[in-house]
């Protein structure tokens, strides 16, 4: 019985952490994007995103999931993410002119307008082919709400099951006590 309670406690802890992360990160991302205009929040210097165009093919394809890390310095040839107004652009650095950087998509013929080095969010350090489709699906408001609702449901169900088992155990204990009392009465009447 204790092993089941321990498992249930671990499940609850995992669900609490999951719900907290989903809600916390969602609120953080919403505030960063809508209040400050930051299209890619980068807590601890790390951000994640999904490639939205074919401009970097064959290195990166549309719907690739990318991990971006903030660096102090950037070099020619690195693939970086920068913010242009409220949009994010994933392109390769082709030239650095002082504190200005010129980028270009591998599939594009023309280079981009120069941007300040400070506009660069970070370097792309990891890409996972096609994973962005799943990420975008999970991030959709309906799916996020369904996942949260399911998590809350499982959490509540876990508490209800434990209460039900506690009630059953209490009833069994009462029945044992009643049977013991009846047995003692029979033994006393024999004497």
Image (cartoon, rainbow, N blue to C red):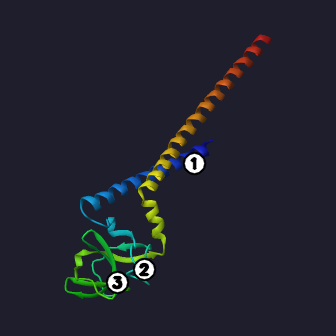
- Residue 30 picture quarter: bottom left
Residue on which disc 1 sits: 7
Does 13 sit left or right of 185 as displayed?
left
Measured along the vertical axis of the image, is residue 118 above or below residue 18?
Answer: below
Q: Is the residue under label 3 in contact with that under label 1 (CB below 8 Å)? A: no
The tag earlier along the polypeptide, 1 or 3, is: 1
| Secondary element type, mark 1 | helix
| Secondary element type, mark 2 | loop
Q: CA distance from mark 1 to mark 3?
A: 50 Å
The residue located at (36%, 56%) in the rendering is 26
Say which mark, if any, is on residue 60.
2
- Residue 84 picture quarter: bottom left
Does 88 sit left or right of 167 as displayed?
left
Measured along the vertical axis of the image, is residue 137 above or below residue 150?
Answer: below
Residue 122 placement (x, y as % from top left): 32, 75
Residue on which disc 3 sits: 105
Q: CA distance from mark 2 to mark 1?
A: 42 Å
Circle 1 residues within 10 Å: few <14, some 14–19, many ≥20: few
The tag earlier along the polypeptide, 2 or 1, is: 1
């Amino acid at each position: 019985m204790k092993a089941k309670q321990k498992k249930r406690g671990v499940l609850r802890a995992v669900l609490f952490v999951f719900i907290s992360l989903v809600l916390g990160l969602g609120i953080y991302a919403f505030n960063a994007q809508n209040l400050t205009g930051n299209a890619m929040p980068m807590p601890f210097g790390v951000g994640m995103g999904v490639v939205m165009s074919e401009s970097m093919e064959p290195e990166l394809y549309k719907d690739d999931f990318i991990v971006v890390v903030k660096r102090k310095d950037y070099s020619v040839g690195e693939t970086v993410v920068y913010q242009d107004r409220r949009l994010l652009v994933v392109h390769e650095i082709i030239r650095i002119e002082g504190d200005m950087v010129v980028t270009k998509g591998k599939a594009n013929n023309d280079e981009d307008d120069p941007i300040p080095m400070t506009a660069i969010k970070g370097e792309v350090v990891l890409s996972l082919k096609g994973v962005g489709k799943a990420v975008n699906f999970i991030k959709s408001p309906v799916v996020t709400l369904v996942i949260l609702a399911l998590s809350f449901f499982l959490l509540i169900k876990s508490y209800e099951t434990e209460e039900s088992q506690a009630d059953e155990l209490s009833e069994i204990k009462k029945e044992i006590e009643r049977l013991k009392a009846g047995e003692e009465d029979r033994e006393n009447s024999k004497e």
